[in-house]
Amino acid sequence: MKIDELSQFLTQVSLFKGLNALEISEYLSKTGFKIKNYKKNETVFFRGDFLKNVIIVIKGTAHGEMQKFNGDITVINRMKSGEVVASAFLFGKSNVFPVDLIALENSKFLFLNKEKYLNLIQSDKRLLLNFINEISNKSQHLSKRIWFNFTNKTIEEKILSYIKENTTNGIIKFLPNISALAKQFEVTRPALSREISNLCKEKILTKIENNLYSVDFQQISQRNV
C-alpha cells in the first residue's frame, strides 16, 4: 500500500480524525511505519507479548480470544478494518497483550513506533485528543460488556440486547458467525442457534440469508429488554 493511499485510508481512523491526507502523510514519514500481512487463522500476537507499537487493522478482521483452564475459548472482542488494537495497553504499567489476537481472514496491520507516535501527539493537540477519546471509548465499551454479561441472564436476553445494539436499517447480521458469537456469549452454539430459531418462529427475526435477518422491533419492544 502506497503512502498516499494509506494516508487517505487513515483519515477515517479514530486516531487521525480531523486531519487531512497530506498532514497524515507527513506524520507517517516521521514515524517510519511498517505494514505486515497475516493469513487467516494466524496468531498475530500471543497473550503476554509486549506492545511496542501503535497497531491499526487496515484490511481484514481479527478477534481477541482467551483460553480457559479447561481448554474452552472465550472470544473477547472482534476488530475490523480501521480499528486500533489494544490502545488502552500502549501506556501504563502493563504494556502487554491481554489476550491472543487471531486473524479471521487474510489481513494487513499497520505498525507505528510507540515512542515516535508519542512525540507526534505531544506536538498536535488533535492527535492527543483523538488518542484520549480512543482509550476512553474502549474503556466505556469494556464497562458495557461487563454490565451486559452480568445483567443479561438468559441467552434470549443476550441475543435481543445484541440485536438492539447492532441492527442497521432493520437488518441484523450475527458477526463474524454464530459459533464465534456463541463463544462471546459464553454459551454453546446449539443453544444459541435454538434461541435464534425461536425468535424466527415468533416473527421477531426473519431470515434473509445465512447469518442475516430482518428485525421486527415492535415485537422486541413488547419484551421490555
Image (spheres, helix red, strand yellow):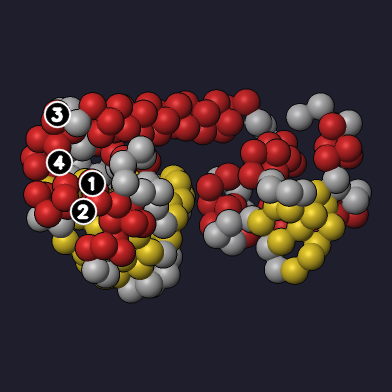
Say above or below: 47 vs 93: below
Q: In the rendered structure, are the residues bearing label 2 and label 1 in contact, judged by CB atoms less than 8 Å apart?
A: yes
The answer for how far apart the CA atoms under marks 3 and 4 are is 9 Å
Q: Which residue is mark 2?
A: 25
Residue 24 in view? yes
* Residue type at the position of mark 2: Ser
Distance Cα–Cα, label 2 vs label 3: 18 Å
Q: Tag 2's secondary structure?
A: helix
On-image quarter of the C terminus: top right
Q: Position of residue 197 (x, y in %)?
A: 81, 57
- Disc 3 on helix, strand or loop? helix
Dot 1 or dot 3, earlier in sequence: 1
Pointers 2 and 3 in contact (C-beta within 8 Å):
no
Indicate the amino acid at tag 4: Tyr
> What residue is drawn where x is 32% and y is 32%?
130
- The residue beneath circle 3 is 122
Q: Amino acid at mark 3?
A: Gln
Query: Which label's residue is closer to the chain start, 2 or 3?
Result: 2
Provide the residue designation for mark 1.
Answer: 23
Q: Nearer the viewer, mark 1 or mark 3?
A: 1
Closer to the observer: label 1 or label 4? 1
Is any atom of residue 69 visible in this view?
no
Q: Residues within 10 Å of mark 4 (few under 14, many from 20)?
A: some
Q: Residue at x 24, y 68 (%)?
A: 2
Q: Picture coordinates of residue 89 (x, y %)?
A: 24, 36
